[in-house]
């Protein structure tokens, strides 16, 4: 019968391999840097009026939801909300957004916008009304770190990313 001369060496190697495999498994399940809730605030000027806008973008590994809120400057009254949500595919530094619902504000008893969003699925009359103005699918370039998400996307299919809202640096919320 053969005797093992260094049993502690075998135990040590087994433990080390187990720890390395566990660490690799944890890294695999970790959310990518782009996943999370992001926000971008800016002002829009229309004649004598100034509007504050807030874009909130929620990204997971395979879905997105973006809500665009517009308020008159120095007012708590919400003028409008437009939302989109759907599936997200990521390859390298490219994200492909495939919309499957649009949203708009829910109105209160005085017919004013609330901060709540009502979602309309693909194929509904409201979705079909919006799809004339919004692309259902588009690809974006992105870069992300712990605090910022830079997203460049041609949202109106005019062949460039020079329009307002197509080159945005979001802050993690």
Image: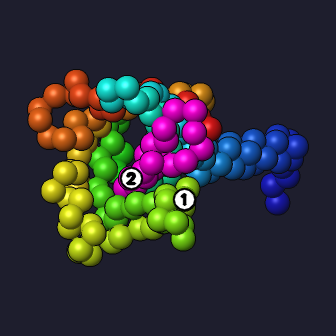
Residue 58 in percent (x, y) is at: 50, 49
Residue 172 in percent (x, y) is at: 59, 34
The verdict on residue 71 being magenta is yes
The residue drawn where x is 49% and y is 41% is: 71
Residue 116 in percent (x, y) is at: 54, 61
The residue indicated by pointer 1 is: 114
Q: Tell me which secondary structure the magenta stretch mostly adopts.
A: strand
Q: Is residue 6 left or right of residue 111?
A: right
Q: Closer to the camera, 16 or 121?
A: 121
Determine whether 126 is above or below 10 in the image.
Answer: below
Query: Of marks 2 and 1, which one's residue comes earlier in the chain?
Result: 2
Residue 96 in percent (x, y) is at: 29, 47
The residue indicated by pointer 2 is: 82
The verdict on residue 104 being magenta is no
Q: Give, as a single range, the part of the protein colored magenta.
A: 67-84
Q: Is residue 64 visible?
A: no
Q: Closer to the camera, 79 or 24?
A: 79
> Mark 2 and mark 1: span between their CA atoms?
12 Å
Q: Quadrant of the N terminus?
A: bottom right
Q: Quadrant of the C terminus?
A: top right
SS class, disc 2: strand
Q: What's the mark number on residue 18?
A: none
Determine whether 154 is above or below 87 in the image.
Answer: above
SS class, disc 1: strand
């Amino acid at each position: 019968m053969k005797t093992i001369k260094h049993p502690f060496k075998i135990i040590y190697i087994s433990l080390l391999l187990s720890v390395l495999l566990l660490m690799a498994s944890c890294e695999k399940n970790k959310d990518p840097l782009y996943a999370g809730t992001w926000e971008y605030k800016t002002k829009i000027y229309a004649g004598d009026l100034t509007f504050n806008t807030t874009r909130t973008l929620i990204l997971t590994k395979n879905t997105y939801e973006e809500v665009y809120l517009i308020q008159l400057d120095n007012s708590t009254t919400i003028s409008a909300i437009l939302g989109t949500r759907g599936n997200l595919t990521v390859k390298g530094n490219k994200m492909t957004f495939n919309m499957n619902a649009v949203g708009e504000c829910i109105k209160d008893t005085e017919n004013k916008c609330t901060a709540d969003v009502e979602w309309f699925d693909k194929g509904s009359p409201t979705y079909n009304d919006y799809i004339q103005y919004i692309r259902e699918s588009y690809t974006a370039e992105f870069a992300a770190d712990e605090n910022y998400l830079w997203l460049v996307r041609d949202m109106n299919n005019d062949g460039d990313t020079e329009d307002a809202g197509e080159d945005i640096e979001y802050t993690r919320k």
